[in-house]
Image (cartoon, grey):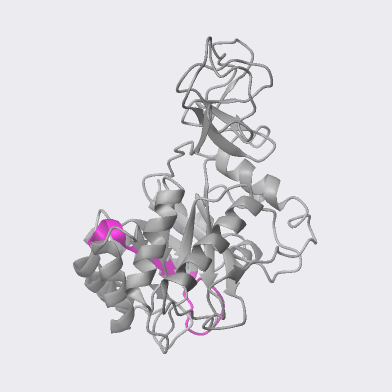
């Protein structure tokens, strides 16, 4: 549903629903309440703690509730949780590169996007990574995107019902994980960025290139560790459509329960954006992973090896006809989409989620 332009709330979202203490309004699809100081919340209550934008659940009580404690201080009464905000039935996603000097603010991205990739965290020391840690920089601040980034991310997650995913790698930034020490450092690094941004909903493995054979065993461990640490954490990957190494990596990840979906990239390469090729190649990925684990990667641009708006629409219609359970589609990139008048958001996304 399209958020109300005045409030940012989706139609039908609960407003003014009181808590047991009668002072906080319910927010988000999980019926969390906005935390207020001094309230003794009952066992099982989920609250949104506005100072950091995270959700907490009352897991222990004493006397008449949580004893008025602050969620970030008392780990006896409180445990961090997720609101369980569900994205629409299908994914309509876009990449949000951080090199743009004056990008649209996250909260102002076209409402048809229900998932936004923050692109990209890169390995410390350059590829394949010297320690396992990654670093991520905010985008340009021409329209206030950097200044308001953390608040906008949490507004997008809690009020607009979007998912925000950190993409790691890209543009030749492959990574290797030859040992558990490097893998653990990577997990800790992602957790640090998670905290820095006030919470994110997942991570996108954009670290395997044609010449970078992925360390599937360790990347499975990393992915499952992140899912364990952050309940509901999404793991995705944008493989090369034709690459057998990428196909085997994604197959192994899905089989291990470590990959929610793969999103082959059909742009920026010879014939990749050919609609006929996309339709036939998607059949291979669906056969390998199952339709619910496949998202179609579009690039709509006035450039060689990119689709036109009409080609993308026709391609999606054929893919959807062949595979009704296909997981969704994404666009590279949100900034290009905005500059062209939102051909993906206003042309393809309404077909993904009518």
**Which x, y percent locates residue 309?**
48, 67
On whether residue 321 falls in the magenta region, the answer is no
Q: Position of residue 24 (x, y in %)?
A: 62, 18
Location of the C terminus (image quadrant): top left
Q: How many marks?
A: 0
- Asked if residue 298 is positioned above or below residue 127 in the image, the reply reads above
**Left or right placement of residue 112 versus residue 69 in this view:** left
Give coordinates of residue 230: x percent, y percent: 46, 48
Q: Quadrant of residue 103?
A: bottom right
Does residue 300 show up magenta in the picture? yes
Res 158 seen here? yes
Residue visible at 63% across and 25% down in the picture:
35
Q: Residue at x 55, y 16 (%)?
A: 17
Q: Nearer the viewer, residue 224 or 329?
A: 224
Task: Give the residue at x 78% y 57%.
Answer: 143
Nearer the observer, 98 or 347: 98
Which secondary structure type mostly characterizes the magenta part of the structure? Answer: loop
In this rendering, the answer to whether 183 lies above or below 159 is: below
Residue 159 or residue 130, whichever sits in front: 130
Q: Measured from the top left, where is residue 177 in percent x and y?
A: 43, 76
Could one spot residue 276 in this view of the protein? no
Is residue 53 rendered to the left or right of residue 283?
right
Furthest residue in direction left, as rendered: 287
Question: Is 235 placed left or right of 287 in the picture?
Answer: right
Q: Quadrant of residue 269?
A: bottom left
Q: Nearer the viewer, residue 284 or 41?
A: 41
Q: Which region of the structure is painted magenta?
A: 290-308
Q: Quadrant of residue 248?
A: bottom left
């Amino acid at each position: 549903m399209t958020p109300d332009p005045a409030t940012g709330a989706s139609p039908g979202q609960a407003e003014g629903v009181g808590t047991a203490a009668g002072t906080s309004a319910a927010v988000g699809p999980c019926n969390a309440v906005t935390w207020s100081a001094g309230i003794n919340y009952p066992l099982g209550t989920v609250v949104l703690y506005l100072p950091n934008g995270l959700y907490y659940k009352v897991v222990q009580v004493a006397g008449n509730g949580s004893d008025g404690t602050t969620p970030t201080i008392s780990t006896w009464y409180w445990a961090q949780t997720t609101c369980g905000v569900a994205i629409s039935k299908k994914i309509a996603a876009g990449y949000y590169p951080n090199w743009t000097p004056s990008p649209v603010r996250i909260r102002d991205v076209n409402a048809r996007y229900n998932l936004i990739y923050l692109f990209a965290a890169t390995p410390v020391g350059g590829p394949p990574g010297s320690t396992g840690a990654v670093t991520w920089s905010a985008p340009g601040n021409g329209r206030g995107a950097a200044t308001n980034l953390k608040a906008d991310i949490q507004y997008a997650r809690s009020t607009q019902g979007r998912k925000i995913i950190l993409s790691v790698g890209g543009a030749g930034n492959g990574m290797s994980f030859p040992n558990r020490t490097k893998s653990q450092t990577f997990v800790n690094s992602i957790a640090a960025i998670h905290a820095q941004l006030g919470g994110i909903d997942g991570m996108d493995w954009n670290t395997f290139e044609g010449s970078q054979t992925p360390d599937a065993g360790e990347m499975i461990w990393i992915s499952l560790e992140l899912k364990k640490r952050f309940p509901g954490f999404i793991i995705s990957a944008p493989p090369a459509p034709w690459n057998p190494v990428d196909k085997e990596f994604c197959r192994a990840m899905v089989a291990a329960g470590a990959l929610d979906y793969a999103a082959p990239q059909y742009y920026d390469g010879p014939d990749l954006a050919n609609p006929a090729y996309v339709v036939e190649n998607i059949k291979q990925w669906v056969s390998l992973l199952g339709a619910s684990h496949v998202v179609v990667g579009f690039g709509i641009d006035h450039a060689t090896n990119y689709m036109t708006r009409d080609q993308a629409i026709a391609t999606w219609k054929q893919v959807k006809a062949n595979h009704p359970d296909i997981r969704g589609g994404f666009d590279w990139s949100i900034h290009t989409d905005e500059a062209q008048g939102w051909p993906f958001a206003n042309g393809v996304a309404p077909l993904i989620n009518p």
